Image (cartoon, rainbow, N blue to C red):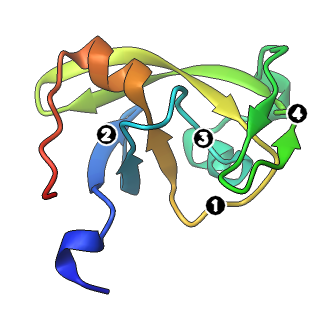
């Protein structure tokens, strides 16, 4: 893969646990935490709050998420409670941070065009 085509991946502290392969996607309107990642924070499906959102993946397939959860995301010295939608599917990232998180942090992602 050419360097300029690679996704923007970070390593962040989430609930005091260092998590790598955190993808930042300015095109995503929500933050996503794959269900398989819940165990890293000592959480289960019982810790999720119900949510009525319907999500669509890149090819346009819809799915009903398991629920939502609030987790503390820390980058550097700045921390923020962040809402994540938890889909039942696996992903090739550990967490996806979308516009909600980017704007809430006051961040300006710099990408190579």
Q: Mark 2 or 4, which is nearer the eye?
A: 4
Side of 84 where 105 appears, left or right: left
Which image quadrant: the C terminus? bottom left
Disc with the residue nearer the chain's start (2 vs 1): 2
In which quarter of the view is residue 52 placed?
A: top right
Residue annotated with mark 3: 33
State yes or no: discs 2 and 1 in contact (Cβ < 8 Å).
Answer: no
Residue annotated with mark 2: 13
Query: x and y percent of residue 1 in the render?
Result: 32, 86
Neighbourhood count class around disc 1 (C-alpha, 10 Å): few under 14, some 14–19, many 20 upward: some
Q: Residue furthest bottom?
A: 1
Disc with the residue nearer the chain's start (1 vs 3): 3
Residue annotated with mark 4: 64
Query: x and y percent of residue 7 in the render?
Result: 33, 62
Disc with the residue nearer the chain's start (4 vs 1): 4
- Look at the picture and state if 14 lies above or below 22: above
Q: Mark 3 or 4, which is nearer the eye?
A: 4
In which quarter of the view is residue 107 placed?
A: top left
- What numbered label is drawn on residue 91? 1
As helix, strand or loop, the secondary structure at mark 3 comes to loop
As helix, strand or loop, the secondary structure at mark 1 comes to loop
Query: x and y percent of residue 71 in the render?
Result: 50, 23
Query: x and y percent of residue 6 in the render?
Result: 30, 70
Neighbourhood count class around disc 4 (C-alpha, 10 Å): few under 14, some 14–19, many 20 upward: some
Disc with the residue nearer the chain's start (3 vs 4): 3
């Amino acid at each position: 893969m050419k360097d300029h085509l690679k996704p923007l991946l970070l390593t962040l502290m989430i609930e005091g646990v260092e998590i790598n392969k955190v993808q930042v996607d300015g095109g995503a309107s929500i933050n996503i935490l794959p269900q398989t990642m819940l165990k890293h924070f000592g959480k289960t499906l019982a810790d999720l709050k119900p949510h009525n959102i319907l999500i669509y993946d890149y090819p346009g397939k819809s799915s009903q998420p398991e629920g939502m959860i609030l987790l503390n995301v820390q980058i550097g010295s700045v921390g923020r409670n962040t809402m994540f939608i938890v889909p039942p599917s696996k992903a090739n990232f550990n967490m996806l941070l979308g516009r909600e998180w980017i704007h809430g942090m006051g961040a300006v992602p710099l990408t190579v065009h």
